[in-house]
Image (spheres, rainbow, N blue to C red):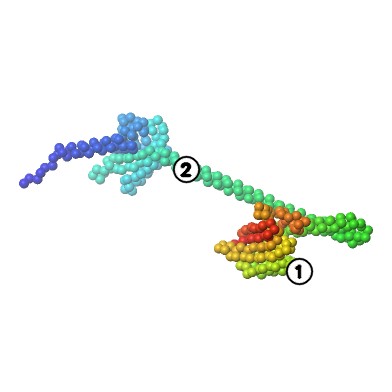
Amino acid sequence: MQPQQPDLQLLYEKLRESEEKYRRFVENAADIIYRTDGEGRFIYVNPVSLRIFGYAEDEFMGKHYLELFHPNFRNKARQYYATQFFNGQYSSYLEFPAVTKNGKQFWLGQNVQPLMENGQIMGFQAVARDITERVLAEEAMRRADEEVRTLNAELERRVAERTMQLENANKELEAFSYSVSHDLRAPLLAVNGFTQFLAMHLGDKLDEEGKRLLSIIRTNTQTMQQLISALLMLSKTNKKELDTITIDMNALAQETYDEIVSPEARQKILITIPLLPPVRGDRTLLRQVWSNLLSNAIKFTLAKDERTIEVGGRTEESKSVYFVKDSGAGFDMKDAGKLFGVFSRLHTNEEFEGTGIGLSIVRRVIHRHGGDVWAEGDVGKGATFYFSLPNK
């Protein structure tokens, strides 16, 4: 029995239908689709290619594919495809700037595959899509990033420049403050000495008004001397290099209180100093912190009927917090921001003596240690001053 022969007419019809479907797909595609011969010259382009590039079909035929590339990119494209095919990577993707017939530039993303026959490359087929919007968006983002980097660099330069100016200004101010404070001591000592001399040698010859005026001069010169000493201490606080050691804060607080409290105040004030967590820091500077806080607490507590001072401390995750709480005059919380400023006082000298620098020294010392200071209070009900120090 003879095998049935295939129906050649049917095969031909199926092939024709398949080619017709392919042709309709290619000609109605939204992308650029074209074919070239083995040398890269066009043998077919779809209608989208004609519309986008602006050439008539007969103008396209025979044109080399590199003529569609921007002139500055042609050598790069030639080398890219030569390398790809030499390495056996026949399917390749390339993004490049293309040029239309009237010179308009736009960007294409193109896939190219070789057309093979008997193991030989007979031509190439490419599918390309307009990616101009994406490329321009990426370029805009790149320029924006560059502008941001440039602005950041300029900002950093200005900040560094401004920081240097501020540091220089602060150094000059500190030097001026130290020099003025130091130079004022001698004439004030002279004024104080002369008033003492006058009081001793002319006391019986002065009337009551003269004695009163001499007393005012001496009181003001002593106040000025205290203020100058405070300014010098403030200046030294900034200049002194930190000598960091582990400090027994319980012993330091008790030792400081014992040194500054008068026998009279010791009898009138009830103070509690429990076990405090140790910390690493400069002992001399932290002693000044305890001295200023405890001195304030003693001063304000003595003016009240209830005279108690409480010292405390606790360890948190990354820091240790200490406080000095008194039952003294207190303050309005709306004025809390003024407490640690230089020469910022909430009370007059007639109410409570002071220079207005002690709490500023406290803040500077604690800030130099990487800590913080704050306060809580209520008028007539006492105040609590806190400071924190890092555990490291």
Looking at the picture, does residue 77 appear above or below residue 193? above
Q: Residue furthest right?
A: 205
Please state which of residues 211 and 218 is positioned toward the viewer in this rendering.
Answer: 211
- Asked if residue 4 lies left or right of residue 343, the reply is left
Q: Amino acid at mark 1?
A: Pro
Looking at the picture, does residue 248 appear above or below residue 340? below
Q: Amino acid at mark 2?
A: Met
Which residue position holds label 1?
263
The quarter of the picture where residue 68 lies is top left
Which residue position holds label 2?
141
- Asked if residue 70 lies left or right of residue 21, the reply is right
- Asked if residue 163 lies left or right of residue 206, the reply is left
At x 86%, y 58%, the residue is 195
- Asked if residue 81 lies left or right of residue 350, the reply is left
Point out residue 383 in the picture as x, y percentages from the top left corner: 67, 60
At x 71%, y 52%, the residue is 173
Circle 2 packing at 10 Å, graded few (<14), some (14-19), many (20+), is few
How many numbered circles does the render carry?
A: 2
Res. 238 in view: no
The quarter of the picture where residue 341 lies is bottom right
At x 87%, y 56%, the residue is 212
Res. 48 in view: yes
Q: N-terminal of the two: label 2 or label 1? A: 2
Q: Nearer the viewer, mark 2 or mark 1?
A: 1
Point out residue 6 in the picture as x, y percentages from the top left corner: 13, 42
At numbered mark 2, what does the secondary structure look like: helix, strand or loop? helix
Point out residue 386 in the picture as x, y percentages from the top left corner: 64, 60
Q: Residue furthest left?
A: 1
